[in-house]
Image (cartoon, grey):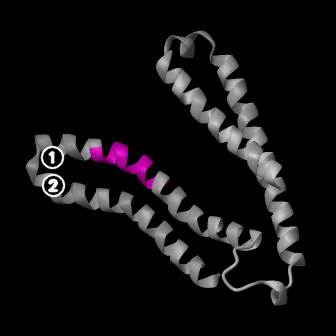
Amino acid sequence: MIFIVGIMTLTIVGLIGLGVYLELFPEKRVSEPRRVRSWLFGNFSVFVVALIVLLAMGTQEVMAETTATVVRGEVTLGLGLAIIGVGLPTGLAAIGAALALGPVGSAALAVVAEKPEMFGRTLIYLGLAEGIAIYGLVMSILLLGKI
């Protein structure tokens, strides 16, 4: 189990390392796009397979666990995976909101610069994009009540 978590951690660290490498040496981005694309696909594939194996192993361990042996305050593997599952909606919704707010915010600034009377409408669009993150937070709160 720890081995699989280690593999997943290495794939994330490798992805961050690739981003730093491409940021420091931008000329490599144009000269070898196929190599970078294949490396990213391989990295993502390893991560997805490890995630599926980890979830399958975690599910098996949680199903075999009895409630009488659990010590109060002890964090088991099942509880840890449940807490990760509770945090995922908020994190993914925040990423989605960030992707939505970027173009909407820049367009709103451009519109307000030319027509200041459109400020109220642009706030509505920004609020709709920000609502995505709020929905994720609400889902996490609801899921937290189920643990």
Residue at point 52%, 58% (across, down): 91
Q: Quadrant of the N terminus?
A: bottom right
Q: Position of residue 44 (x, y in %)?
A: 71, 39
Q: Toward which corner of the image does residue 113 lie, by quadrant? A: top left
State the SS at label 1: helix
Furthest residue in direction bottom, as rendered: 68
> Which amino acid does the dot numbered 1 rest on?
Val
Q: Position of residue 134 (x, y in %)?
A: 42, 68
Q: Nearer the viewer, residue 82 or 44?
A: 82
Horizontal side, residue 13 vs residue 19: left or right: right
Mark 2 in CB contact with mark 1 (< 8 angstroms): yes
Q: Nearer the viewer, residue 136 or 84?
A: 84
Horizontal side, residue 72 vs residue 103: left or right: right
What range of the chain is rendered magenta? 96-105
Furthest residue in direction left, as rendered: 116
Residue 114 lies in the magenta stretch:
no
Residue 112 numbered mark, or none: 1
Residue at point 72%, 25% (across, down): 38
Q: Of helix, strand and loop, which mostly describes the magenta segment?
A: helix
Whole-angstrom CA distance, mark 2 to mark 1, is 6 Å
Q: Which residue is mark 2?
A: 119
Q: Earlier in the sequence, mark 2 or mark 1?
A: 1
**Mark 2 surroundings: few (<14), some (14-19) or many (≥20) residues within 10 A:** some
Residue 14 numbered mark, or none: none
Q: Position of residue 128 (x, y in %)?
A: 35, 62
State the SS at label 2: helix
